[in-house]
């Protein structure tokens, strides 16, 4: 690639805008990979509750333990093996540095490489791992529908309800949205951006919704069908075992500076913590939850949670009186058929 040399009247570089990484708000580094390329995480089972055997008088039928059956706990492991070992290299020619008014400098070029290439790659990989391994993936929604402004909050609440039912801690939950979804959310009366301090804004939080920090991530770093995701940091381990970046000013391979970089990283959703991630995809080519005639089937409704059924009913202006899942499905099917 050719180098455009510049006169002294243009001692500035037209930099590309790039978002800072926000994945640290959604992930953790609780495990130490120092000295190892993989670690094993134990998963320990629990014991069932029993009725205490009191007043046992018959020796023939007396249990070994009055507390219940004496069983060992089951201990299994899951292996977290680092799979991403990435690198880059480029040269800063000494004359190019001199004749571009020092704009082609090794230090700034390295910072640019990290900001525009490395960080987006790590972010994209991490978000894809979280989405792929989410404990709950809802049915796609159509955010282009006219009523989405009225019902999007209900979809978010449905996701929160799923995490509540799975007993995920309420504190530190994060709602990740694309700029398109954020445009809708910021118009909601429930959205609060007044209780976000300067430090939280610097870290990437743009507001609060249903007690969750709202984080806006560029769509280019997210799966193509990404609507929003609710995640607790406990679910995803995102280690960076090695990040080694060097400027080799004195070397025999070129007249100038060679810049090298290497980063070894990965992301893992823990098996027992996957339920702390709720992913809401969007429909790419229209509604994906209808058959060829545009009619919802009973099988599709049975695949939804009660919270999602309530959202669906509200979207279709159906007033529900039932409380059980089976009765709610019957009411929705009856209303849609009529």
Image: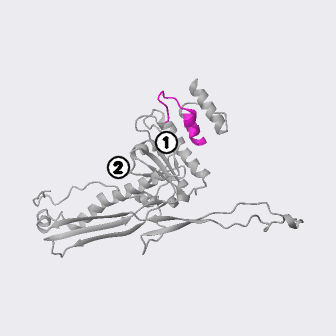
290 sits to left or right of 180: right
In the depicted view, which residue is nearer to us: 17 or 186? 17
Place of residue 125 in the rendered image (x, y in percent of width and height, measured from the top left): 38, 56
In the depicted view, which residue is nearer to us: 32 or 211? 32
The mark found on residue 202 in the picture is: none
What is the secondary structure assignment of the residue under circle 1? loop
The residue that appears at 14% across and 63% down in the rendered structure is 101
Image quadrant assignment for residue 33: bottom left
What is the secondary structure assignment of the residue under circle 2? helix
Name the residue tied to disc 1.
188
Q: Tell me the magenta residue range.
A: 289-314
Q: How many numbered discs, if any?
A: 2
Seen from this angle, which residue lies furthest top? Answer: 338
N-term-proximal mark, 2 vs 1? 1
Name the residue tied to disc 2.
220
Report the quarter where the N terminus lies. Answer: bottom left
Disc 2 and disc 1: Cα gap in Å? Answer: 25 Å
Any part of residue 16 in sight: yes
Report the quarter where the C terminus lies. Answer: top right
Front disc: 2 or 1: 2
The residue that appears at 38% across and 45% down in the rendered structure is 224
Place of residue 18 in the rendered image (x, y in percent of width and height, measured from the top left): 31, 55
Any part of residue 199 in sight: no
In the depicted view, which residue is nearer to us: 64 or 190? 64
Q: Is residue 300 magenta?
A: yes
Place of residue 43 in the rendered image (x, y in percent of width and height, measured from the top left): 57, 64
Crowdedness of circle 2 by 10 Å Cα count: few (<14), some, many (20+)? few
């Amino acid at each position: 690639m050719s180098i455009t040399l510049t006169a002294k009247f243009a001692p500035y570089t037209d930099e590309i805008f790039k978002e800072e990484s926000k994945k640290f708000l959604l992930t953790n580094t609780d495990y130490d990979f120092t000295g190892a390329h993989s670690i094993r995480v134990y998963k320990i089972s629990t014991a069932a509750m029993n009725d205490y055997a009191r007043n046992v008088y018959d020796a023939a039928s007396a249990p070994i333990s009055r507390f219940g059956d004496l069983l060992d706990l089951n201990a299994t492991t899951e292996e977290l093996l680092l799979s991403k070992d990435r690198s880059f290299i480029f040269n800063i020619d000494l004359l190019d540095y001199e004749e571009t008014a020092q704009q082609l400098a090794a230090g700034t070029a390295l910072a640019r490489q990290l900001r525009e290439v490395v960080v987006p790659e790590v972010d994209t990989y991490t978000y894809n791992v979280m989405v792929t391994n989410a404990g709950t993936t809802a049915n796609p929604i159509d955010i282009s529908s006219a009523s989405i402004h009225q019902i999007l909050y209900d979809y978010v609440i449905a996701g929160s309800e799923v995490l509540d039912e799975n007993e995920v801690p309420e504190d530190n939950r994060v709602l990740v949205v694309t700029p398109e979804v954020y445009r809708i959310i910021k118009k909601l009366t429930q959205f609060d951006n007044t209780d976000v301090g300067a430090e939280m804004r610097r870290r990437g939080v743009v507001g609060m919704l249903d007690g969750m920090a709202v984080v806006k991530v560029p769509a280019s770093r997210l799966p193509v069908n990404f609507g929003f995701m609710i995640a607790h940091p406990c679910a995803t381990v995102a280690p960076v075992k090695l990040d080694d970046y060097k400027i080799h000013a004195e070397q025999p391979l070129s007249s100038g500076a060679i810049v090298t970089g290497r980063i070894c990283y990965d992301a893992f959703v823990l098996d027992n913590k996957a339920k702390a991630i709720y992913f809401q995809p969007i429909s790419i080519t229209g509604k994906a939850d209808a058959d060829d005639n545009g009619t919802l089937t009973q099988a599709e409704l049975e695949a939804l949670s009660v919270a999602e059924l309530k959202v669906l009913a509200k979207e279709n202006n159906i007033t529900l009186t039932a409380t059980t899942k089976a009765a709610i499905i019957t009411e929705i099917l009856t209303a849609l058929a009529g």
